[in-house]
Amino acid sequence: MKKIGLLNGPNLDRLGKRETKFYGLKTLSEIEDKVKEMSTICKCIVDCFQSNHEGSLINKIHEWSDDDFSGLIINPGGLTHTSVSLRDAVVASGLKTVEVHLSNIHAREDFRHKSLISGIALAVVAGMNHHGYLYALRFLSEKT
């Protein structure tokens, strides 16, 4: 069975509590539960991980790559715009990747418009709130 990693970066553990006008009311746990429900339909296994620490995110990408995962759904949070190291880890992993953002980063502050991940991802989903994760999973399950 295909294995897909769901990786969430800094501050996404605060979903449902922070800036709900941008990020919605669902908690990260609720989003992960929805993705896992969808994984049975997509006939794949999803492993979820969140960290506020860049190195932990990079280590998890390496682990999934070594464990023969085929895909990665990533919401890098604020690291989207700053982390060359996270980008390099995604490239080195060889995982087919979809970048997800709950809000439309292109309709927000200028510094959010540039993503270091988008150029190496198969697809980018932004502004669809928690639904973006489900679309990313469906897409990856067909592409991996």
Image: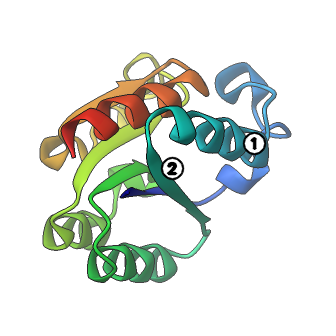
Q: Nearer the viewer, residue 15 or 70?
A: 70
Figure check: 16 above or below 22: below
Mark-to-mark CA distance, 1 and 2: 11 Å
Kindly identify the residue that appears in the image at 73 percent across and 55 percent down: 13
Kindly identify the residue that appears in the image at 42 percent across and 37 percent down: 137
Residue 116 visible here: no
Q: Secondary structure at mark 2?
A: helix
Q: Position of residue 14 (x, y in %)?
A: 77, 50
Q: Which residue is mark 2?
A: 77
Q: Position of residue 130 (x, y in %)?
A: 61, 28
Q: Secondary structure at mark 1?
A: loop
Query: Would you say 142 lies left or right of 129 here?
Result: left
The residue carrying pointer 1 sits among few (fewer than 14), some (14 to 19) or many (20 or more) residues within 10 Å by Cα, namely: some
Figure check: 70 above or below 16: below
Quarter of the rendering containing residue 141: top left
Amino acid type of the residue that numbered disc 1 sits on in the rendered structure: Leu
Q: Which residue is mark 1?
A: 15
Figure check: 64 above or below 100: below
Figure check: 99 above or below 57: above
Amino acid type of the residue that numbered disc 2 sits on in the rendered structure: Gly
* Quadrant that contains the N terminus: bottom left
Kindly identify the residue that appears in the image at 20 percent across and 38 percent down: 143
Residue 136 visible here: yes
